Image: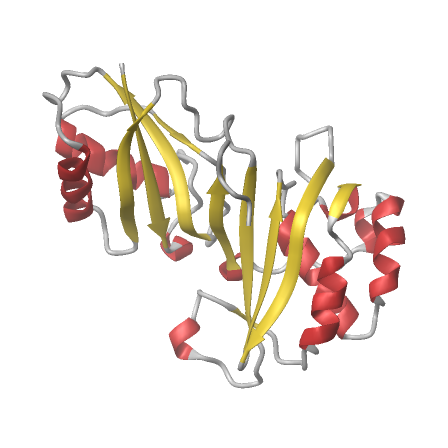
Amino acid sequence: MRNIRMTLAYRGTAYHGWQVQQNARSVCTVFQDAMEGVLGRRYDVKGCSRTDAGVHANRFVLAVRCPEDVPPAIPCGALQKALNDRLPRDIAVLDCADAPEGFHPRYDCVGKRYLYKIWNSPVKNPFLEDLAWQYRYPIDGELADEAARRFTGRHDFTSLCAAGGSVEDKVRTVFRCSVRREGELVTLSVTGDGFLYNMVRILTGTVLEVCSGKLRPEDIPALLEARDRRRAGPTLPPQGLYLDQVFYPGDEIL
């Protein structure tokens, strides 16, 4: 069997997430449609993660297993071009390469980086519509960064897990978590070995609770120790969230 690894970038606005949905348009379904148009057959696709409706991806890794002779040894470069010709403008194949037969984009992953983008202004930005969440109240960038850094380390993140998550073990390691401001655009970046359901959106909402004065940075350790979702901030909307990078053995986790 041939195992083809690809990296996608997509704008999630028009999709109900990555995963195939019975009654909704998903990124995976549209990608499989394009693959079927190129290869003449529909193949199963394994993705590195599930993304919710409206969430974006800068580098989403997937794998497609197919017989080596179907189609007859199409080169990866030609496959990438053919797919990009068929895919809509909000999905792009960034790279395409043959991978070891045992490669699995989800199970082999050792870390991920997410971004959450906030347009911090009382005036909306039409050029960032659905690409950043507007927050009208002042954000102190240094205070937000101080709060974000309190999440680093290995913790039980039950307080940052939304209802509906099915994972029992909620212990994760956050390698880096920081906030930077560029004009009116504020971006939270968090890198970890794994993330719980809505964890990044709740984490960012908790940082904003610090900026609004409802919490202090020094409250965060106790908030995590409480293992109580009610202690953390709100779950922010999906349009500011990006899966930014997926890491595999041998990668430098940044």
Q: Nearer the viewer, residue 231 or 163?
A: 231
User: Total label count?
Assistant: 0
For the residue pair 253 and 79, the one nearer the viewer reads as 253
Q: Is residue 218 above or below residue 97?
A: below
Residue at position x 55%, y 52% in the image: 114
Residue 121 is left or right of residue 210, and the answer is: left
Which residue is pictured at 44% across the width and 45% down the height?
17
Q: Is residue 235 visible?
A: no
Q: Position of residue 53 (x, y in %)?
A: 47, 49
Q: How is the image coloured?
A: secondary structure
Q: Residue at x 26, y 37 (%)?
A: 96
Image coordinates of residue 125 in percent, x first then y, are: 45, 79
Image location of residue 253, percent across then percent down: 55, 44
Left or right for 3, reference 126: left
Compared to residue 131, the image places residue 23 above or below, namely above
- Is any part of residue 3 visible from this angle? yes
Judge from the rendering whether residue 201 lies leftward or rightward of residue 132; answer left or right: right
Residue depicted at 63% across the width and 55% down the height: 201
**Quarter of the image where the N terminus is located:** top left
Residue positioned most to the bottom = 123
Q: Where is residue 44? Give x, y as percent.
A: 32, 24
